[in-house]
Image (cartoon, rainbow, N blue to C red):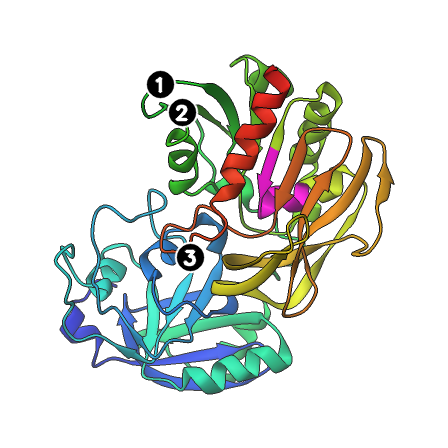
């Protein structure tokens, strides 16, 4: 159902959680219905990058910051070709955007892309509920989509859970494309797109890397057809336990000893390739203010996150794998979740968070330099 911003703000809406908790507000963005996993994001800024991050596919994102939309929407900050979130939940959206780069309002963009949202609910109470009960299936219903509560709850409970969901192929590119190096070309990297954000190849291009972005279904022959100096595995949505293809590809790269770097979903893929398991977090890490310690330097970084799954690897010992020794290189200081892996006998490492972080913070940008150092070492 298409409607204007002014009209949608008057339309009643409800958010229904799978455990029966209901929040009532008004429509925000498109009017209709949507389903997904309800998760909360703690970033006070960067909502445009969040909404266009493919890792949020099939998730209803709750903004914990009470005021959202102040800087509007522009044509430069999208991380991909579209908005991927299933729905958006905000408390107090801006009535008028105020930023010199804005070309339209956030709610106008949500309407244009058909994203159903809800406004005016107690997002603090909702966030506390999700922290206590965990991320869960949910539905947003507005206008004519509102039905008796029992019927809406039954429809939410009939939706598939995120655990076991294979989503990375549906968000990835279908065709290979190239992001040229900025300035003099120094290296070539094959980047496997599992839900890559646009800023990631840009961060590599800034360092003189020509990036060949390959589909999630790429084979080892596809990877080495570009004669890469390094291989990169991107972020992405869904359960890493379903990603057998990327795991097999990563093992083939490890066998050849090519410098390898993975982020987010790519970290989970590396964990599986090394023989570790993965598991679903209660409510995950999402936002741009998560403290992580780099154990190789002792430095604490404020980092951007978006993950609901993690690698099950021992924190305090070096593990033996078919590809040599591996250690946990980064750890979250809030809950001791594994945030990075580093091989000691091969040029490969990964982190669970987002060092490209277009909206900030930029504490972890050095990881791209670490990747460059691996490729320099291999070439030497």
In the rendered image, residue 95, in percent from the top left (x then y), is placed at 17, 75
Mark 1 vs mark 2, CA separation in Å: 6 Å
Question: Foreground residue, 146 or 268?
Answer: 268
Query: Is residue 316 within the magenta segment?
Result: no
Point 35% across, 18% down: residue: 184
Query: Is residue 263 within the magenta segment?
Result: yes
Mark 1 vs mark 3, CA separation in Å: 27 Å
Asked if the residue under mark 2 is in contact with the one under mark 1, i.e. CB atoms within 8 Å, the reply is yes
Q: Is residue 270 above or below residue 12?
A: above
Q: Where are the magenta residues, as a range? A: 261-269
In the rendered image, residue 225, in percent from the top left (x then y), is placed at 55, 12
Q: Which residue is mark 3?
A: 361
Label 2: few (<14), some (14–19) or many (≥20) C-alpha neighbours in 10 Å: some
**Dot label at residue 184:** 1
Q: Secondary structure at mark 2?
A: loop
Q: Mark 2 or mark 1, which is nearer the start of the sequence? A: 1
Locate the N terminus by quadrant. bottom left
Asked if the residue under mark 3 is in contact with the one under mark 1, i.e. CB atoms within 8 Å, the reply is no
Locate the C terminus by quadrant. top right
Asked if the residue under mark 2 is in contact with the one under mark 3, i.e. CB atoms within 8 Å, the reply is no
Q: How many marks?
A: 3
In the rendered image, residue 305, in percent from the top left (x then y), is placed at 52, 58
Q: Is residue 91 above or below residue 283?
A: below
């Amino acid at each position: 159902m298409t409607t204007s911003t002014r009209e949608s703000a008057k339309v009643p809406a409800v958010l229904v959680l799978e455990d029966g908790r209901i929040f009532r507000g008004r429509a925000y963005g498109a009017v209709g219905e949507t389903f997904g996993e309800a998760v909360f994001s703690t970033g006070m800024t960067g909502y445009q990058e969040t909404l266009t991050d493919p890792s949020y596919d099939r998730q209803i994102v709750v903004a914990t910051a009470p005021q959202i939309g102040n800087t509007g929407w522009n044509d430069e900050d999208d991380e991909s070709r579209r908005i991927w979130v299933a729905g958006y939940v905000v408390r107090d959206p801006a009535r008028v955007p105020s930023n010199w780069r804005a070309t339209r309002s956030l709610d106008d963009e949500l309407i244009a892309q058909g994203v159903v949202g809800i406004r005016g609910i107690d997002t603090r109470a909702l966030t506390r509920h999700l922290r206590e009960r965990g991320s869960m299936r949910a539905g947003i219903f507005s206008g004519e989509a509102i039905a008796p509560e029992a019927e809406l709850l039954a429809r939410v409970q009939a939706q598939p859970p995120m655990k076991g969901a294979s989503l990375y192929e549906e968000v990835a590119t279908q065709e290979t494309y190239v992001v040229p190096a900025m300035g003099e070309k120094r290296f070539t990297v094959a980047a496997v797109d599992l839900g890559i954000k646009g800023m990631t190849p840009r961060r590599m291009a800034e360092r003189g890397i020509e990036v060949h972005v390959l589909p999630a279904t790429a084979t080892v022959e596809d990877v080495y057809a570009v004669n890469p100096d390094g291989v990169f595995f991107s972020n992405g949505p869904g359960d890493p336990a379903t990603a057998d293809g990327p795991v097999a590809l990563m093992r083939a790269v490890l066998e050849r000893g090519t410098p390898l770097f993975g982020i987010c979903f790519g970290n989970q893929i590396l964990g599986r390739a090394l023989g570790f398991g993965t598991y679903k977090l209660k409510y995950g890490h999402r936002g741009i203010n998560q403290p992580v310690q780099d154990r190789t330097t002792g430095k604490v970084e404020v980092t951007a996150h978006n993950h609901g799954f993690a690698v099950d690897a021992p924190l305090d010992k070096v593990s033996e794998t078919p590809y040599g020794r591996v250690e946990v290189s980064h750890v979250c200081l809030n809950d001791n979740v594994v945030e990075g892996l580093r091989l000691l006998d091969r040029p490969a490492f990964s982190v669970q968070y987002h060092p490209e972080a277009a909206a900030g913070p930029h504490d972890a940008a050095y990881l791209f330099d670490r990747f460059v150092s691996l490729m320099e070492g291999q070439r030497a």
